[in-house]
Image: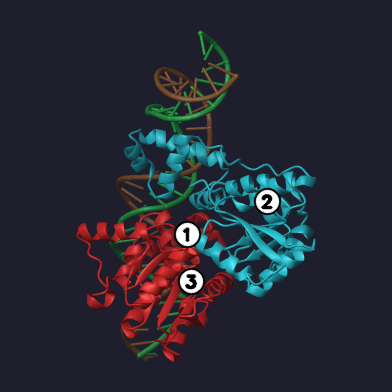
Chain colours: A red, B cyan, C green, D brown
Amino acid sequence: MGKTKILLADDHELVRDGIIALLENEDKLEVVNEAANGKEALEIIEKSIPDLLIVDIRMPELNGIEVVKKVKKDFPALKTLVLSMHDSTEYVVQCVQAGADGYLLKGSSKEEFLKAIYKIADGGKYFAGDISAIIVNNFVNGNPTQPVNQQATKKEPALDILTKREKQILKLILEGKNNQEIGESLNISKRTAEAHRFNLMKKLEVKNLMELTRKSRELNLI
Amino acid sequence: MGKTKILLADDHELVRDGIIALLENEDKLEVVNEAANGKEALEIIEKSIPDLLIVDIRMPELNGIEVVKKVKKDFPALKTLVLSMHDSTEYVVQCVQAGADGYLLKGSSKEEFLKAIYKIADGGKYFAGDISAIIVNNFVNGNPTQPVNQQATKKEPALDILTKREKQILKLILEGKNNQEIGESLNISKRTAEAHRFNLMKKLEVKNLMELTRKSRELNLI
DNA sequence: TTAAAATTAAGTATAAATACTTAAAAAACT
DNA sequence: AGTTTTTTAAGTATTTATACTTAATTTTAA
């Protein structure tokens, strides 16, 4: 059997270079392509499908989860391993639902990383230790995680639901400005800023500032 | 001349492993030690001083900037290269003031990374291209950046100014809870939660939620 | 064992955000 | 040219946060 062709998608070149160096001695593996964001990754895949996609969860343009969703829909044979910088458990369930074959925290060791790659390349699944528990827990709580291509996609606020003005206002909100200050910045009434704030928070389905920051990051809105 | 002994401090093992793999072929460089947080880094340095410290800016226990400050005070001969995941320019000035010999974004390439290391090991300084501009700009604006050991340290809220209770409440604030909910979580009155919130925001010198999140991350309070 | 610090929580006043609705211009499409 | 969407902004009521001060307990450290 030939080498496993890997596409590596991460917006930090140094991290990519590190991972490539990490895989250099593995003669069953070969990084054939790199992408600095989700969009780029999809473009590369459309030209030549690799065997395995290693993708960072947080990337500009299109985040890891969205990439995995698209990949699993259009190229179901392509295996996917999601890397996350966040030690949080926030995205695990979303990844599983998107159909990812593996999920690793960047806190994992080289050994675990290689183990995951080989297992996934071999048709298996690999989720970092403490993560399995979360999935199981989520499952028993009546929220079964199933690949996105096997059931209706959970409707989620799209990436482009915000208007230009709303994005502008979101940015100012995230800079810590209040409605008064936003109004002054944009030469509109404080009441207009209020209205925009209300609307965008409703669109993003968040009910406070903290959820707003989380969601904004998640969706790469800023 | 012998090898440059490097201590690598980053809380993500995979990133460390990647960097080590990246330096494996460089026979003038040798990673002699690793640390997963700032405290660990300082402990290692106290036992045996390396030639170069490569340190991630965001780490638990003690962040990169604090480590550099301590290092430059106690071991001025030890060179320091700060890595940052954040493409932002938020920390550059702080790094220079702390006395760092270099600052690189993780978006840098392997080549730039090696160039920086060799230059610093050789007694030079290296700041990623776009960064120099920021420093210069900051300088001409009457805010000259000088190493921390050459002038009075800019007073800043210390890392441990928050009491246990305040940290507890901060955590809940950052989870998006309001004072009512915080009170319920901790079985205290909503008014008490308010008081704690007021006090901790005053201590951290922030005036809104966004500044609070930024500061919390910066100081690794959570 | 005291003094100091931390936790609790109330009072009071003001400012800001939330939760809507309505509606008129302006801009962007088809 | 006509329709839809966006941007603007006011009304109204309610909730929440800010900005303090004061002060009684409780815990911790000297």
Location of residue B126 in the rendering, given as x and y in whole percent from the top left corner: 74, 65
Q: Is residue A57 above or below residue B41?
A: below
Other-residue count near label 2 (Cα within 10 Å), few / some / many at <14 / 14–19 / ≥20:
many
Look at label 3 and name its amino acid: Met
Q: Secondary structure at mark 3?
A: loop
In the picture of the structure, the residue carrying the numbered disc 2 is B68
Read off the residue under disc 1: A107
Q: Are the two marked residues, 3 and 2, in contact with CB atoms closer than 8 angstroms?
A: no
Residue A102 shows up from this direction = yes
* Mark nearer the N terminus (3 vs 1): 3
Q: Looking at the picture, how far across and down is residue A218, in whole percent?
A: 42, 65
Residue drawn 49% across the image and 59% down it: A173
Mark 1 is surrounded, within 10 Å at the Cα level, by few (under 14), some (14 to 19) or many (20 or more) other residues, namely: many
Residue positioned 31% across, 60% down in the render: A132
Residue A161 in view, yes or no? no
Looking at the rendered structure, the secondary structure element under dot 2 is helix
**Picture layout, residue A114 above or below residue B150:** below
Residue at coordinates 43% horizontally, 37% vertically from top-left?
B194
Tag 3: Cα neighbours inside 10 Å, few (<14), some, or many (≥20)?
Answer: many
Which element type, helix, strand or loop, lies under badge 1? loop
Q: Which residue is mark 3?
A: A59
Answer with left or right where residue B41 lies relative to residue A123: right
Q: Chain of mark 2?
A: B
Q: Residue A28: give x, y in percent of width and height.
A: 45, 80
